[in-house]
Image (cartoon, grey):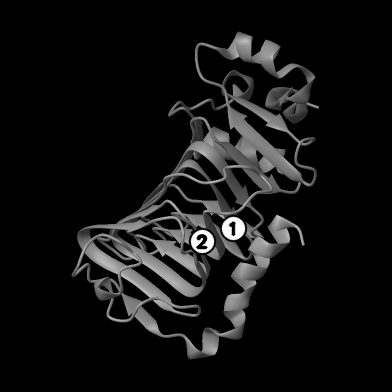
Amino acid sequence: MKKTMKNMLAVLSVLAVAGSASASIWSGAVDDDWDTVGNWDAAPVPGSAVTIDTVGAVVNKYAGNDATGLGTMAVDNGDLNIYGAIAGGSQTIGNGVGDVGTITVMSGDGSFGGWNSLATWDFTLADGGGNGTLVNNGGTIHAYGNWFNVAAWGGTALVQLNAGHLIVEAANFYVGAGGVIDLAGGTFAIAGSRLGDLAGLIDSGGLTSYGNNYAGNYAAGFAWDEVTNPGYTTITAIPEPATLSMVALLGGGMLWIRKRFKS
């Protein structure tokens, strides 16, 4: 069985246990390790509704004991750092008014078809008016299903892609006025031919390259590829002032967004 199918089944398996989900609320009573049982009122198991809601909390999910099949995971307040793997049916970050939550994928496989550091069916950041941040420093983040919303209904949200992959197959993908996806070394792949959507997102300031806005000047900051990952639009950022050298390095494998948008 392909790795991507195994990863997807790990997420979908939560549906079989959703009806008996138990609550797992972080207390951090012992240390900062996710896998320390005493840090939870009830340790997470497949189907659990996991909540991290402690201002200033730092939770580390180390490699070696993957947390898959979670029912839901909400990082309302605090920081979750992922060195291993977490998968669940729906995940939220900083959704409530006044909430400030962050998930950082610290490391991982980082490839398109490899194992996922963070996998989910639905993903929402700051939808309830809070502040949510999702950072990828080298793993693979994969949203399979219905929603991938970045400050869709208010609030402030940042998706910071420093390395690795962000793969979005969600049927509903939306970045609101308070949301930004910043590409700064990683790769963003979204299912389908979505260049028009991405162009609009760049123009609105919702998709940036190394923190810079390239509205109306896509080729200066971005390149796209629909060959390496068939069925996906894959977009990467070009750091300044290396635009011309990147053209030579990428050769024919990457095409400038501007060419496609104007065709």
Q: Which residue is drawn at 41% across and 85% down?
A: 22
Q: Earlier in the sequence, mark 2 or mark 1?
A: 2
Q: Mark 1 points at which residue?
A: 143
Numbered marks: total: 2
Q: Between 10 and 62, which is closer to the camera in this rendering?
A: 62
Q: Which residue lies furthest to the bottom in this view?
A: 20
The relative height of residue 59 versus residue 21 in the rendered view (above or below) is above
Percent across and percent down for residue 193 are 76, 44
The answer to whether residue 99 is left or right of residue 159 is left
Amino acid type shown at disc 1 = Ala
Residue sitting at 70 percent across and 57 percent down? 4
Residue depicted at x 51% and y 46%:
108
| Marks 2 and 1 in Cβ contact (< 8 Å) | yes
Residue tagged by mark 2? 123
Could you tell whether 207 is left or right of 146 in the image? left
Image x and y of residue 188, in percent: 60, 41
User: Image quadrant of residue 116?
Assistant: bottom right
| Quadrant location, the N terminus | bottom right
